[in-house]
Amino acid sequence: MIKIFIIDDSAVVRQVLTQVLNSIGGFKVIGSASDPVFALKKLPADWPDVIVLDIEMPRMDGITFLKKLMQERPTPVVICSTLTTKGAAVVMEAMSAGAVDIITKPTVNLKDFLQESRILMSNAIQGAAQASVKSISTEDLLPIVLKTPLRAMAETTDRLVALGASTGGTQAIEYILTRLPKTSPGMVIVQHMPEAFTASFAQRLDSICQVSIKEAKNNDRVIPGLVLIAPGGKHLLLRRSGAQYRVEVKDGPLVTRHRPSVNVLFRSVATAAGSNAVGIIMTGMGDDGAKGMKELHEAGGKTIAQDEQSSVVYGMPKEAVKLGGVDKQIPLSEIPEFIMSC
């Protein structure tokens, strides 16, 4: 039984979330509070497995509480936020501070929306409950010195990196991208994330990285020093156009329960780039990306998986390894150097 505690200043949200989550087998909401100050008085009596946290609340905001929690008693946190541009930027700050996933809520018709979102909420809570959450130290945030000498890369798309992640992936991706120089290969990334959040995710990363990072648009070219992130709610595919690689952003059904899907990206990379590609599968719940990585491996691409010890949730990497599509597993700390050595 997964024990859940809800912190949200809306009584309606607390009531509806409690009803919906308690209706899902294996879940039990053990308490709720209107803000973190009240929550801190209740939590010690029966500590939950997962905390569902709003951002904007009176007396203490969600970001402040989250940072305090991660320092004093790291606990998996799922952010419950509205789909707004302003809110998306704050949610990205929360993800960077240690939250492992996002549940979205609209500003109107809340009850109907949450009832329809039982599967998404179930996946988020289950993934969070499996997450290995650790206190973030100052050393974790410092850049590393790459052992491999950096070589200048011409304006070519001969080599590219395709990366897929889910639960815990926002922090892991930030760790990697902040350690890459402008000379790094072009990259295409699928991170499971609701629409309206991926643009803010890309913008935040672009502001703190040497490489350029943007939410992918249809027909964007993949070039060295540029990272393209799949938009939430859309699939991202790689296409070959003469001597260039370009991306296709398109609608479509859920694939392996996701849109964007890592499987869709990896399969397209296997077809378009084959042995010129590097595939990286990282922390996340489920098996999205496992079949696509095997196809990329069989097409001659280099394939690696994040190892269990450094993964927040060792689900997607594990499934890819089981299918035989992974050349080797390495810790998160070694992935930036691996990318630059390819």
Image: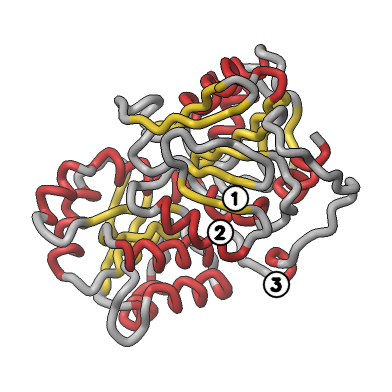
- Single out the mark in the foreground, 1 or 2: 2
Task: Name which residue type carries label 1.
Answer: Ile
Task: Name which residue type carries label 3.
Answer: Thr
Query: Residue 192: percent from the left, percent from the top?
Result: 44, 42
Q: Is residue 81 left or right of residue 184?
A: left
- Single out the mark in the foreground, 2 or 3: 2
Query: Residue 340: percent from the left, percent from the top?
Result: 79, 42
Residue 138: numbered disc: 3
Q: Secondary structure at mark 3?
A: helix
Residue located beneath label 1 in the image = 173
- Neighbor class of circle 1 (other Cα within 10 Å; few <14, some 14-19, many 20+) is some
Work out whether residue 185 or residue 324 is closer to the camera in this orientation and state it.
Answer: 185
Work out whether residue 277 or residue 79 is closer to the camera in this orientation and state it.
Answer: 277
Work out whether residue 175 or residue 322 is closer to the camera in this orientation and state it.
Answer: 175
- Tag 3 and tag 1, C-beta contact below 8 Å: no
Q: Earlier in the sequence, mark 1 or mark 2?
A: 1
- Tag 1 and tag 2, C-beta contact below 8 Å: yes
